Image (spheres, helix red, strand yellow):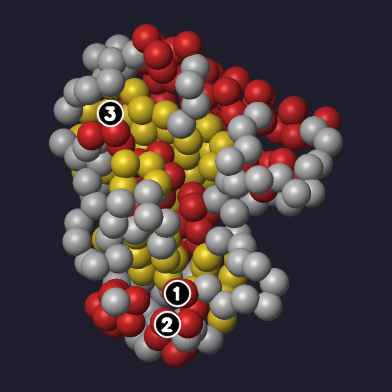
Amino acid sequence: MPFEKELRIATEAAASAAERIRRDYESFVAIPNAPASISTETDRASQEIILKYLQSNFPDDALCAEEATETLAKAKKDAKRIWIVDPIDGTRGFAKKNGEFSVMIGLAVGGEPVVGVVLEPVVDRLTYATRGGGCWVRVDDCGPESCRVLQTDALERSTLVQSHSKPREQSSPVKAIKPAKVLEMYSAGVKLALVARGEADLYVNTYLAFSDWDICAGHLLVTEAGGKVTTLKGAPIRYGVAGHKQTGGMLASNGLLHDAAVKALA
C-alpha cells in the first residue's frame, strides 16, 4: 500500500492524542456559549503529542499546525513533504461537550494530500485514506470497511452537511442548492468524513479565509472514496502555499453533483 509507514505513524499519533483528549473531555466543564475562536489547553497538549511523534519518525519533513506550541515553533516550515495537523478540529464541539470534534492529520507532498486521518475520539471512529489506497473506516477496532460516496445525481435529492446555522436561518449554500436534507455538525473533518462514508452528498465551506489544517486530511478521504474536492469555483486546492491559507472556499461532493453544485453556488 502506498505511504503505508506514513499512515501507520499518523494513526498512532492520532490515537495517542485521542487518549489525552478523552481523559480531559471527561472532566471538562461544558461551555454552552463557546465561541468559534476557542482554544483549550487540551488543543495544545494533543498537538505536542502529535508533532513530537511525527518529528521523531520523519525528521526531514516540515510541520504545519493550528496551535502555537514549542515543537511547531522549532520545526521546519517548508519542505516538499509537510504534515498538516489540527489537534482538535471543532473545539466548540469539545467545549460544548456534544462530541462533534476530531483529530486531523494530513500529509501533503508537492502541495497534494497523500495521507489523511480523521479520528473522532468520543465514538472512537477512525476514517483514513492514502493516495491510491482508497478510503477506510474503523470503529472500536472493528473493520476496516471500505468507504464509498453516495450515488445521488440530483441536487434536490441530496443531503448537505454544514456548520451549525442560526436558529430559523437558512445558510447561503442551503438557499442555493436546495437539498432534500441538511445535517449540521462542528468539525470540518467530521463533515468531510460523512461525505466520504456515504452519509452525506455535499459539504460546502464558504469562509473567506481558513487554513490548510481545517481540510487537508478530510480532503483525501473524499477523493479516495470516489468524490471530488475543489474551491467553490471548481479549481484545484493546493496545500503549503504562503501562510497555509485557503481563500477560495471549498466544495466536497460525491462527484456526480459537483458541476451542478458549482453552478448553483455561483
Q: Residues within 10 Å of mark 3 (few under 14, many from 20)?
A: many
71 is higher (above) or lower (below) than 129: above
**Secondary structure under the numbered disc 2 in the rendered image:** helix
Q: Nearer the viewer, residue 9 or 23?
A: 23
Find the distance from the CA under tag 3 to the CA under tag 2.
Answer: 35 Å
Q: Which residue carries the number 1 mark? A: 173
Q: Nearer the viewer, residue 177 or 1?
A: 177
Q: Which residue carries the number 3 mark? A: 82
Where on the picture, by quarter, is residue 15?
A: top right
Position of residue 87 measured from the top left corner of the image (x, y, whole percent):
53, 32
Amino acid type, label 2: Ile
Q: Can residue 130 be spotted in the picture?
A: no
**Secondary structure under the numbered disc 1 in the rendered image:** helix
Answer with mark 3 or mark 1, whichever residue precedes in sequence: 3
Direction from residue 127 to residue 149 in the image, left or right: left
152 is higher (above) or lower (below) than 204: below
What residue do we see at 36% from left, 33% from top?
84
**Circles 1, 2 touching at the beta carbon (< 8 Å):** yes
Answer with mark 3 or mark 2, whichever residue precedes in sequence: 3
On residue 118, the disc is none
Q: Between tags 3 and 2, which lies in front?
A: 2
